[in-house]
Image (cartoon, grey):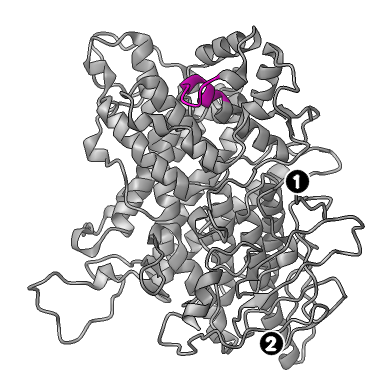
Amino acid sequence: METYDREADSITEGDQRPSKRRRSTATTLHPPREVGLMRSIPGDKISSFVGSSSGVYFIRSVYSAFRSHLNATAPIPSPEVPGEDDNLPSASPNGSKRIWRGNEVAPHGSSTITFQKLVDWSQSYFANWHPAYPFLHAPAVLSFFESLSQGRDARESPTSDSEFIILRAIMSISLADRRQSSSDNEEPYPAELVFQSYDEASNSVQHAFSQPVSMQSLQAALSVQLFLVSMLRFNAASRLGGLIIRMALQMGLHRCPQRYPSFSPIQRELRHRVFFSLYCIDRFICQSTGLPLSLRDDDIDVCYPSLERHADGQASSVDGRLRLLEFLSRHCHIRGDIMEFKHKSIQHAQRETDQAMVITSKLVKLANDVDEFIDFDENHPPTLSPFHSTLLKILHHESVVSLNRPIIASNSSGSTYEAALQQCIGSARAIITSLHDAIATTPLREQASFTLFWPSFTWAVWMSTFILFHAAYTKHVSTAMVSRLADKSLRVLEHLARRGSVWPEACGAAIKDLQTRLTRNTSKRIWESGVIRPESSTPSPYDNATSVASPHVITSHTPTQTTIPTLSEPAQEHIVADATPTHRPGARVTATGRISRGSYDLDNISVPADTGSYVQTSDNNPNIVPLGDFSQNGLTLDQSFPFSSNDDHDPFAGFDIPFWLGQDQYAGMINEWS
């Protein structure tokens, strides 16, 4: 079952509970609040918590609004928060299933490793990730590349070798990057240079528990964490982050190195870089999963590179390449302020009525500083790449959404609500348009401007589109405009899905589902008014999503297409047998297990690649699993699965992962609930 976290309404033992709870408004001492979600299985066999800063409350509020407006009788599922890998339906969410396809890696020992090949293979990491998170010392990495190319056998490197762990993380990130880019270099990576599974990546840093902490071991753990984050494995990255934070604190990285003369200038700079890198990664994970901050700002006195307060004498010049890290750190500091202000337990929530204005002023100042830095470089070689410049703008809009979303999720009228909604609409449009423009091709531009590698882009597009759905539902924007932007969102998510994570496609399926419902409801109103006005939208890669069917009916279109029940249908458990698509001769499909209830387009859902069962069913995204038709296989709905129809309860109680195929980790529990 699932319950919202009512910590905001709880009282401590000995307090007197008021006889009647007053309705909260925007004018009370406490600001409008969202709440988290506790997922638990009877008997406490499995429980997980996702906090309100992840946006789960708002997403479900949008679903609930559509449900009540369309008079649906069945509970409406919603997707998990992107990155909740613990809730992936596999026996071991971070398990030993292979990450890479057969044509992406070469067998052990079959490739000659040269220095130039190592440089080429790692190019994407150093171009896109290292400028943002410069926790590695690049000359030291290149030195290791050279020693490896001069005869050191990678297969003989111990798993606890920090240098080799760093190498494998770099290569794994770069190989994943190549899936999204149109790189001409398609030479497979040696299997020994990449992590073959998420288990292998996580287990590679186990030696850190028993060995004294060192800078190199911390860098190795950070590199593995960054790989997990880049693949949207936030739960695993969060657990590893606990180790990383403790290692950093033991090394004193939370103290400004300028205060200690024992460190050389090179050591001071590296400590700065390592600390702010882990600070940014940790803040991103905490916000994405809704968990409390691991590092509080009042425990830190490390200075930003351009704002050093502890240096004696004349200030030294600042490397311009570190300004990106500084901007990201300031952004993460603001996101932490938002989490403390909007998502803290009510007993400890800040009550300053002007706190929102303080945070807004910090956001505006950061945006102005970024613009000034970019404009200053007009007559010089650009310090920030187009990708990183766009990234900073997207992160600004993400913060605007995070600051204002709790207001629109917990209120429905008033000037505060209207102002917050317009802020969210503007930022949502900017996020979707900016990311779509980056990957769009035109007659004058045959290739995309740059590739979208950043892990928060999935969350940003997903949340932005749901904000627009909410705005359309409340008649603040037109349905036609929202439908056009939803199509752009789907194209961005299709691009992000090429990396191999299942989350972008799952979010895309949810967006397509609500888009269908929004346009259907609009068409119904137009028809009833006697005015027929077609709602046109550009075809999207999710256009073969769920067809709208009558309740309790499974519609069959073709012998090889599975029709999944829509949100208005009863949420039920389905069994799907193997099926081989006739439109793709020779395609192989592995046996699939239970498919949890829901309305998502299963024909377009990525699953982690497995060399032995990889399916080629799309020119745009090879990670597509075809399904057989229910009627073709003589299958029926499981009518024994109970779902509450009481609107007073959580409408999303029950099984909450409606879009995954096969190897369902919760399949064995369905019978216990029945």
Residue at label 1? 440
Q: Which residue matches tag 2?
A: 525
Q: Nearer the viewer, residue 141 or 29?
A: 141
Q: 78 and 516: which one is in front?
A: 78
Instruction: Label 2, secondary structure: give it.
Output: helix
Q: Which residue occupies 52% across, 47% down? A: 233
Question: Left or right: 494 with respect to 89?
Answer: right
Is residue 385 in view from this perspective? Answer: no
In the image, residue 606 lies at what x, y percent?
69, 55
Q: Is residue 32 above or below residue 167?
A: below
10 Å crowding of disc 1: few (<14), some (14-19), many (20+) = some
C-alpha span from label 2 to label 1: 33 Å
Q: Amino acid at mark 2?
A: Arg
Which residue appears at 26% of the width and 68% of the height?
Answer: 8
Residue 568 visible in rendering:
yes
Dividing the image into 4 quarters, which one contains the N terminus? Answer: bottom left
Which sits earlier in the primary sequence, circle 2 or circle 1?
A: 1
Residue occupying the far front of the picture = 156
Q: Which residues are magenta?
A: 157-167
Left or right placement of residue 324 versus residue 11 in this view: right
Q: Nearer the viewer, residue 162 or 296?
A: 162
**Element on which disc 1 rests:** loop
Q: Residues within 10 Å of mark 2 (few under 14, many from 20)?
A: few
Image x and y of residue 424, in percent: 50, 60
Q: Is residue 247 above or below residue 468?
A: above
Q: Is residue 159 magenta?
A: yes
Q: Position of residue 269 (x, y in %)?
A: 38, 17
Query: Relative to residue 109, is residue 663 depicted above or below?
Result: below
The reply to whether the magenta stretch includes residue 8 is no
Are the residues at dot 2 and dot 1 in contact (C-beta closer than 8 Å)?
A: no
